[in-house]
Amino acid sequence: MHLDCCSRPHTDAVEDYLKAVFDLSALHGAATTSSLAALLDVAAPSVSAMLNRLAADDLVARPAAHRVELTAHGRRHAVAVVRRQRIIEEFLVRALDVPWEDVRAEAERLGHAVSGRLLERIDAHLGHPTHDPHGDPIPPADGEHDEDRPPPLSAARPGTHVVVSRVSDRDGDALRHLGGLGIRPGVGLDVLERAPFDGPLWVAVDGRRIPLGSRLTELVFGGTP
């Protein structure tokens, strides 16, 4: 895939790096060489070599020694990759009933092979969805995209009611567990109490008391209605 602004197509690896920088920047405010290496499961020297190539193509900038940012050019490409993957995820869940914990990996594999024309046909077939199965916003075909997310459930205070808007798709086992508990985008949670000494956060879902450890509460995002 490449946009008209580029003189050569991008490889699958380039797209993966651009999306990784996008995801890390949205979640943590910045991407670093070490966080990219961990996310992509590649060695640090390989990350450095790819970042040098991306910088030469004006896709990323290196404002500090280990910090990585998308340029305006790179962000356009990254958002296009994100749009494609999230539309495919929504299609796989809706049309083929692929479990939400498996859909990310399948969409990443399929996304590299789907043409822009086919993607827009899928989008139209789905009725132009605005969010994927995990609640992540689907960038529009044209116009600005806002990736901001509400705070994680770990920041919720006891006594509040939280409506889940997004659930991180990075951990398939956690997604399977949360889905089994009925915790998905659109579901309301009553935050009951936080156990002391790093104990679980107790929430109520449809009247059921459920303990959620810190690992899970960092994956669920939502806000008060």
Image (cartoon, helix red, strand yellow):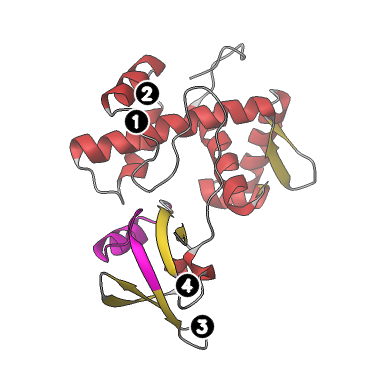
Q: Is residue 167 left or right of residue 45?
A: left
Q: What residue appears at the point 68 percent right and 28 percent down from the top-left corner? A: 72
Query: Which one is closest to the eye, mark 1 or mark 3?
Result: 3
Badge number at residue 145: none
Q: What residue appears at the point 57 percent right and 30 percent down from the top-left corner? A: 144
Q: Is residue 59 left or right of residue 2?
A: right
Please, what is the three-letter code of the amino acid marked with disc 4?
Ser
Q: Check disc 3 and report its element: helix, strand or loop.
A: loop
Q: What residue appears at the point 50 percent right and 88 percent down from the top-left corner? A: 196
Badge number at residue 198: 3
Badge number at residue 214: 4
Sequence order check, earlier mark of 1 and 3: 1
Tell me if I can see residue 79 in this picture.
Answer: yes
Query: Is the Cβ of the residue at disc 2 closer than 8 Å to that at disc 1?
Result: yes
Query: Is the Cβ of the residue at disc 4 closer than 8 Å to that at disc 3?
Result: yes
Which residues lie in the magenta part?
170-190
Say if 201 sits above or below 148 in the image: below
Please, what is the three-letter code of the amino acid marked with disc 1?
Leu
Residue linked to disc 2 = 113
Badge number at residue 110: 1
Q: Check disc 2 and report its element: helix, strand or loop.
A: loop
Q: In terms of depth relative to the viewer, which is nearer, 74 or 34? A: 74
